[in-house]
Amino acid sequence: MGNWVENEGLSIFVVLVWLGLNVFLFWWFYLAYDVPPKFFYTRVLLGRALALARAPAACLNFNCMLILLPVCRNLLSFLRGSSACCSTRVRRQLDRNLTFHKMVAWMIALHTAIHTIAHLFNVEWSVHARVEEKGTMAAVLSSLGDKPNESYLNFVRKNIPNPVGGLYVAFTYLAGLTGVIITLALILIITSSTKTIRRSYFELFWYTHHLFVIFFIGLVIHGAGRIVRGQTAESLAEHNPDICSKNFTDWGKKGACPIPQFSGNPPMTWKWVVGPMFLYLCERLVRFWRSQQKVVITKVVIHPFKTIELQMMKKGFKMEVGQYIFVKCPAVSKLEWHPFTLTSAPEEDYFSIHVRIVGDWTEGLFNACGCDKQEFQEAWKMPKIAVDGPFGTASEDVFSYETVMLVGAGIGVTPFASVLKSVWYKYCHDATNLKLKKIYFYWLCRDTHAFEWFADLLQSLETQMQERNNAEFLSYNIYLTGWDESQATHFAVHHEEEKDVITGLKQKTLYGRPNWENEFKTIAGNHPGSRIGVFLCGPEGLADTLNKQSISNSEADPRGVHFIFNKENF
């Protein structure tokens, strides 16, 4: 339980506070429209649908205020890098920014659905009240505003019956038209954000996500029509709805209640979202400024398994281990930016990324760099590259622990290339001040060729540790999760050789998948009373497994061993 609080406690607390604020706002604004006399006559026309439309509107304002903040990457990187602002525990919550972004998006979708359905009833009843036979209170209230010196309550001013009247309101009134537009934009944004679309049709996801600009513009002006109206304070002072509603046919006559006066609610959404919109505008300006800075590709290396390495230089570029950048290649697409983990170390005079060729954009980058040609490519023939970043990730905290577990799956090993390179450089110079004392490294891969580009780094680190008489510093296990019968025979024949037949390393490649429970128990036994950082760059299924193992293998005693789970998330 203690480590569950350590790993998930702050996240659960943040989510509960967020949910609590949503519940509070919904209930508060529901009562604000369902109880006060100001909206007595509005409720006569619309019933409970009035409060059911306004309550989710308040929640929409709140969540639309939050939705942009988790994607302000420069702001998060600034907070993450400021030790005065963020402890390690808080920084781990910043690494879950996209998870929170998705949760807020689904909350926006929920409240949009409630708000829209309630307003469908409001429009239908308002149109019906406008064309209803005279003599009812709804008809009298709807006719207010037809004569001079009267203010209207029913925003529907034309006598057009349903369903044409409802369509007329939806497509000719500002509130109706903007409501249709922002709802369609939201539907397109959410449906194109599914995991399948993001992985298979990233361009579709990227382009439709930018409909958020239309969404926010429509959101800000949505309430400018002031269709939700209530009785003015001056009118309430001389016209008590509880009393006057009983004699509505005599309003305005001598000795009777005066005709009630109404006004529309002023638009409030802009007050909620102007701050985050300004921050996000600054974010985009910083990104644009960075994208205009010159980037030089100094080297392109073609690795096996359809992977290329780009080594680049940029004036003033500074990085930490495990960080990532966004890359744009105008020769492939003038608008698309794609995230890549940095595989170089801060100690190197260049920065590098490894790109696996898996889609149209990466295929275009492969060809633009001349990797499809046999002859040597001159540097001046390299395509122009724009870089935004670097941005912080969970891997930055590796050196905050004495013992760490690094788990990479497939190309997910890239952030740990930066970590291991940095460790190698620190040991080459002076490792006396290095807090990190032990690394357990796990790499899971389906294909033997995928190991080749990373094996040289492991060999260098392995040699360096042996020369320093610290071979125990790094324990690495490489797992091959896919092989065929001919490969199995080949592995068996060469199993007794000193070095591994696949990687050339002294540590033999293992086949299948790790028994994580045994691995965690062994490490816990080797490091009693320690805080052990668990870092993963890999799929969600593996993340769930490691998170559960981190919790179940930690001790309740604060002085016992604790596994702290961290996941790359970008």
Image: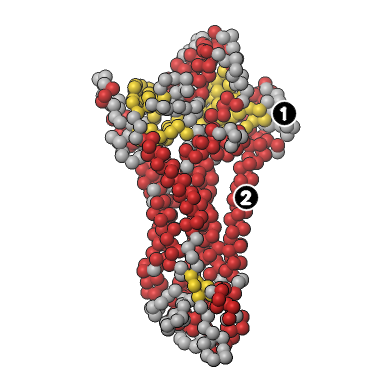
Q: Name the residue under label 2.
A: 17
**Who's the residue at 47% across and 20% down the image?**
347
Q: Position of residue 522 (x, y in %)?
A: 65, 23
Residue 21 seen by the camera: yes
Q: In which quarter of the image is the N terminus?
A: top right
- The single residue placed furthest to the bottom in the displayed view is 254
Comparing labels 1 and 2, the label whose residue is closer to the camera: 2
Q: Name the residue under label 1.
A: 560
Mark sitting earlier along the chain (1/2) = 2
Residue kind at label 2, given as amino acid type:
Val
Residue kind at label 1, given as amino acid type:
Gly
Q: Which of 156 and 517 is in front in this view?
A: 156
Kind of element beneath mark 1? loop
Q: Where is residue 570 in the image (x, y as percent from the top left)?
A: 47, 37
Residue 326 vs 124, above or below: the answer is above
Kind of element beneath mark 2? helix
